[in-house]
């Protein structure tokens, strides 16, 4: 079955020669076609171009008129923790009263609070709680998402989370990648015995995760007060034996050495990056690793902003993801992340588009199949409401500007997302 979208005011992020990622100055450019058509066949993009060159379509097809509207590739969100139990708005109160993220964590709050609740929640219930979040991000334009474990911190808890992610892969129209984050925090039973917990992650949890093929990637929270560079090295070495490429949390709370150890292990991405200096930039320049910023977490925790502008000006690529999680970023709204990225990190509209589509697709190792409008890529797109320019997307930061969502060639009604 084909879908023809015609009279598109602007077809955004088109590529004739698809790239895996976009770096430095090239981030300020995107391909686009004014007064365009787009043809989707089954779950793939078949053809696109100027209206005046639109071909005759044979057979049955559905036609959508997009006059005054734009078509974008769906957002790719390469860093989330959207499978979790309950919520943590109580800590949010503590934060408003002045406690820092680390202080809350030290008191047994934070990640450990989510872990306690998750271990008491059944797999079915966890799935049911995750589903509305999935539907919400679909309605906000996301077409691919990475989801991490890391609120189990026990063998059963971690496997339960990863099984829920697997089920979401099978039952939702999103492209989903899963990441094993056993080393997200040291559980209370292991207080004062961090190295024993690291051994437990490596020897007890990881082999089971690999055996059930539950993870695509491996992550460690490598930062001050969490896991050290040496522990990260050990865990990533163990993950590599099972073919799990790293995507790690790094340099959120300090110059933690996380970027260096990530690059040493050829990480697909290093994420957060509030603390980045010349040394870190140099290391990233000689790598295949995608520097990823998480503007929602920096906003919500009132953290210093990552020097993203400096990194782009130094020739690096940048990806922007949501970090959707109950503690530091309770939102997976990628359009909003784009607004944060432009206002707080000085990314232009074109840079925001590259950072939230092709570069985040790269950070999930799926930029060959999604992240831009290119022939043969997945038919994951959204049609906007009537908007004057691409800048308007980040500018109107509180407005829902998405009119129609198409994932895998299927039109998703927004009412289905409620
Ligand atoms: O990416 N930094 C580590 N982990 C999450 C926070 C998780 C939580 O607080 O629940 C993050 O911000
Ligand atoms: Fe995170």
Image (cartoon, grey):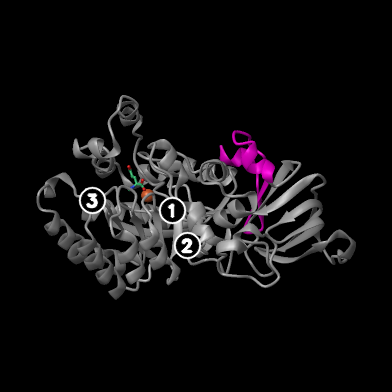
Q: Is residue 97 above or below residue 324?
A: above
Q: Measure the alpha-carbon separation of dots 3 and 2.
A: 23 Å
Find residue 79 and name its label: 1
Give yes or no for residue 406 being in the magenta stretch: yes
Q: Is mark 1 within 8 Å of ligand 2?
A: yes
Find residue 11 and name its label: none
Say which residue appears at 51% left-offset and 52% top-offset: 309
In the rendered image, which quarter contains the N terminus? bottom right
Say which residue appears at 51% left-offset and 64% top-offset: 362
Q: Is residue 126 above or below residue 173?
A: above
Q: How crowded is mark 3: few (under 14 residues within 10 Å), some or many (20 or more)?
A: some
Percent position of residue 380, x then y: 63, 57
Q: Residues within 10 Å of mark 1 (few under 14, many from 20)?
A: many
Is label 3 in contact with label 2 (beta carbons under 8 Å)? Answer: no
Instruction: Write down the region rendered in magenta.
Output: 391-418
In the rendered image, which quarter contains the C terminus? top right
Along the polypeptide, which appears first: circle 3 or circle 2? 3
**Residue occupied by mark 3:** 226
Task: Evaluate whether residue 320 shows in this view.
Answer: no
């Amino acid at each position: 079955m084909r879908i023809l979208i015609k009279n598109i005011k602007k077809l955004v992020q088109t590529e004739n020669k698809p790239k895996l990622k976009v770096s430095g100055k090239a981030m300020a450019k995107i391909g686009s076609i004014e007064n365009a058509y787009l043809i989707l066949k089954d779950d793939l993009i078949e053809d696109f171009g100027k209206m005046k060159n639109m071909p005759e379509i044979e057979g049955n097809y559905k036609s959508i008129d997009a006059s005054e509207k734009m078509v974008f590739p769906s957002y790719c969100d390469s860093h989330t923790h959207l499978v979790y139990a309950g919520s943590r708005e109580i800590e949010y109160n503590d934060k408003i009263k002045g406690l820092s993220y680390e202080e809350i964590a030290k008191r047994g709050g934070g990640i450990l609070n989510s872990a306690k609740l998750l271990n008491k929640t059944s797999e079915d219930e966890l799935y049911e709680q995750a589903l509305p979040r999935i539907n919400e991000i679909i309605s906000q334009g996301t077409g691919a998402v990475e989801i991490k474990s890391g609120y189990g911190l026990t063998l059963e808890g971690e496997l339960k989370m990863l099984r829920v992610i697997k089920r979401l892969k099978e039952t939702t129209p999103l492209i989903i990648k899963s990441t094993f984050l056993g080393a997200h925090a040291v559980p209370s039973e292991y207080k004062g015995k961090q190295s024993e917990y690291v051994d437990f992650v490596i020897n007890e949890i990881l082999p089971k995760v690999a055996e059930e093929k539950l993870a695509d990637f491996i992550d460690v929270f490598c930062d001050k007060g969490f896991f050290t560079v040496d522990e990260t090295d050990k865990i990533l070495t163990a993950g590599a034996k099972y073919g799990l490429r790293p995507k790690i949390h790094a340099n959120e709370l300090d110059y933690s050495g996380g970027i260096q150890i990530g690059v040493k292990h050829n990480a697909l991405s290093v994420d957060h990056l509030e603390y980045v200096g010349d040394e870190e930039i140099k290391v990233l320049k000689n790598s295949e690793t995608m520097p990823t910023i998480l503007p929602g977490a920096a906003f919500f925790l009132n953290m210093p902003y990552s020097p993203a502008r400096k990194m782009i000006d130094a020739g690096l690529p940048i990806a922007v993801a949501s970090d959707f999680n109950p503690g530091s970023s309770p939102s997976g709204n990628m359009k909003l992340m784009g607004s944060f990225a432009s206002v707080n990190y000085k990314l232009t509209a074109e840079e925001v588009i590259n950072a939230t589509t092709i570069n985040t697709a790269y950070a999930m190792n799926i930029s060959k199949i999604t992240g831009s409008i290119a022939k043969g890529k997945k038919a994951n797109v959204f049609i906007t409401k009537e908007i004057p320019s691409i800048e308007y997307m980040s500018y109107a930061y509180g407005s829902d500007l998405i009119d129609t969502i198409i994932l895998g060639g299927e039109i998703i009604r927004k009412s289905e997302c409620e």
